[in-house]
Amino acid sequence: MNLAWYWTALIAFGIVNFLLISASVLVYAERKVSGYMQNRPGPNRVGPFGFLQPFADVLKLVFKENIVPTAANSFVHSLAPMLMVVIAMASGALIPFARGVVIADMAVSVLVLLALTSISVYGVTLAGWSSNNKYSLLGGLRSSAQMISYELSMGLAVLSVVLISSSLNMVTIVEDQGGGYGIFAWNVFRNPIGCILFIVTAFAETNRAPFDLPEAEQELVGGYHTEYSGMKFGMFFLAEYVNFFIASFVIVTLFFGGYLLPFESVLLAQFPGLEDSILLMIMQIGTVVLKASFFAYLFIWVRWTLPRFKYQQLMTLGWKYLLPISLVNALLVAIGVIIFS
Amino acid sequence: MLSDFIPFFIQLGIAIGLSFTLLKAAALIGPKRANVIKQGTYESGMDPIGSAHQRYSVKFYLVAMIFIVFDVEIVFLYPWAVSFREFIAAGVGPGVLGVIFLFVIILAIGLVYDIKKGGLEFD
Amino acid sequence: MTVSILFFVLAAAALTAALGMLLSRNPVTSALWLILNLFCVAGLYLTLNAEFIAVIQVLVYAGAIMVLFLFVIMLLNLASLPDLKRIEWKRIISFMLGMGLLAMLTFIIAHALDVMPDPLSLDLAAETGSASSLAKVLFTQYAMIFEVIGILLLAATIGAVVIAKRKPV
């Protein structure tokens, strides 16, 4: 999009607000879904069906005291949650929401996304270190070791997508999946192992169950955010939910055709007037949000289905299984590209 | 191009503004009643024994070191992935794939060595 | 014009960050300054239109190498450094002035002898700094050197394992 900077700023502001709202909807959805999965109603007191519960929670967090332990490094103690929120919100700029509707469309946007992921390790590490608490430090060390271990397999899964579409640009990657075979040109069919690898590593990178060891409450109390309360804790919480929503968007963009409608090329051939119309744009935005919501639901679903890993199981899975598999997968995809071109 | 990054930096600026606002709003609105017990370090209700900043297992260092090696490897693979179709069009696809294959094998030896030596055993 | 203003802003920020890293007393704060410095250098690459290199700079240096630094600082408990010496400002300032003079002299001599490299135009830089132009030479002309890099990385892995897994004597 070539817009004046103030329009870009307005849209960016809109996307940040969209992410804030969707985070509170996701908090509500998570509590409601887990309630039904455990045969209890979930939140149902604040507002109709308890829908205003997350807003009440936000108000509660704002009115709480900002406690910084005397032993903590107060600057780094505030820097860590800020870093988490900034990275989570900034990655929203890279997601294409419809044809031509993406804030930052640079030639290397997939790499920028990976770079943001790699920086988010600091939020966890610094939170653990600055609290000067044994549980925090252990939780921070553990989760940063976990995040860097799974980052490699994630990078290789993205690499296999880049091999297929031969571009580092997210929009090009999406458009490349709109071939003549309808949904069968989606990368999930062209590169199924890469898709599974990416989804698993996305769970690990966002510290969601079954990879939520950093906050294993039986052994580490709250992990890296043991010493955080009030709004700073709320910021970690917000970042977690925004992160897994963004992760769902990225899964959809890289493997499930992004904003493309299923069989879009067939549809466009049938109704040529639809091309470049506002209606198509709205349909595309609806499609990508719908697809991403399914994966957000998957994140919640998995949380109540799989038990948490032990630490050595997690490291074994990351280094002895996922990394070799993703290396072999990248080479296999390369051979496939040679054969099919 | 630099101009492609400007929208991204705008979003980054808005995100920084948001996180500042959240922190400052909470600091302004929330009560401020500090006391020694509340500001103390949490250690399951006991008085903390020693500082948390102690020496930790060297295994984390090993994980980080091997992570760097493989991260650099993956970074080297990205230019290849982007232009692999160009290589195929130029007729050197299998040859370049051979080069990459050898590179991956060399680094896989390191991973296998590390696993055999128990460098990644956490227990 | 904007690019040259950006250059001076980023260069000043990078220098400040580097000085902050050298002067701060806490190892973790030092590491944070260094991370800021690496970001500024990535910004400098961006002003030269080398976006691939800029992102790689963040991904590898800030995202991987600095994580290792932070880990080591935490693992060794460097948070409390023993007996720090006071900084001797006179020596530092005289050193900086001396280096400035040396840089100016080198510039003048290089200018007089006409050995200055020609600056690339930004469009050409955007072309040569991209991933595919890098790939064109790296995997064909310099394939041998590429494999040697692989062996170097292998040596780093094995060295790390040998040091960390050494049995206590």
Image: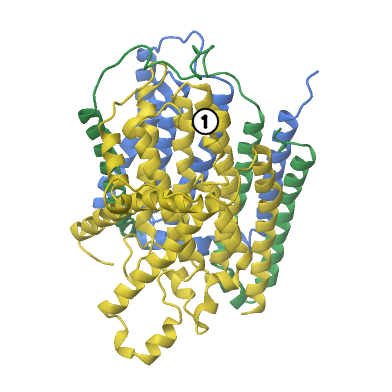
**With respect to residue C99, does A262 lie above or below?**
below
Q: Specify whether A236 is left or right of A223.
A: left
Q: Identify which amino acid the numbered label 1 is placed on.
A: Leu
- The residue shown at (26%, 49%) is A47
Q: Which of A135 and B19 is in front in this view?
A: A135
Q: Nearer the viewer, residue C71 or A273?
A: A273
Q: Which x, y percent locates residue C100?
A: 35, 29
Dot 1: what SS?
helix
Q: Which chain letter goes with mark 1?
A: C
The chain assigned the colour green in the figure is B
Q: Nearer the viewer, residue A262 or A33?
A: A33
Give the residue pinned by disc 1: C70
Q: In which quarter of the image is residue A3?
A: bottom left
Name chain C's colour.
blue
Q: Which of the image's four quarters has the N terminus of chain B?
A: bottom left
- In the picture as drawn, the residue positioned furthest to the bottom comes out as A270
Q: Tell me how many marks there are.
A: 1
Residue B92 visible to the viewer: no
Name chain A's colour.
yellow
Q: Which x, y percent locates residue A221?
A: 51, 29
Q: In which quarter of the image is residue C64?
A: top right
Q: Which of the image's four quarters has the C terminus of chain B?
A: top right
Residue A246 visible to the viewer: yes
Q: Which x, y percent locates residue A273?
A: 29, 88
Q: Specify whether B22 is left or right of A306.
A: left
**With respect to residue C17, does C85 lie above or below?**
above
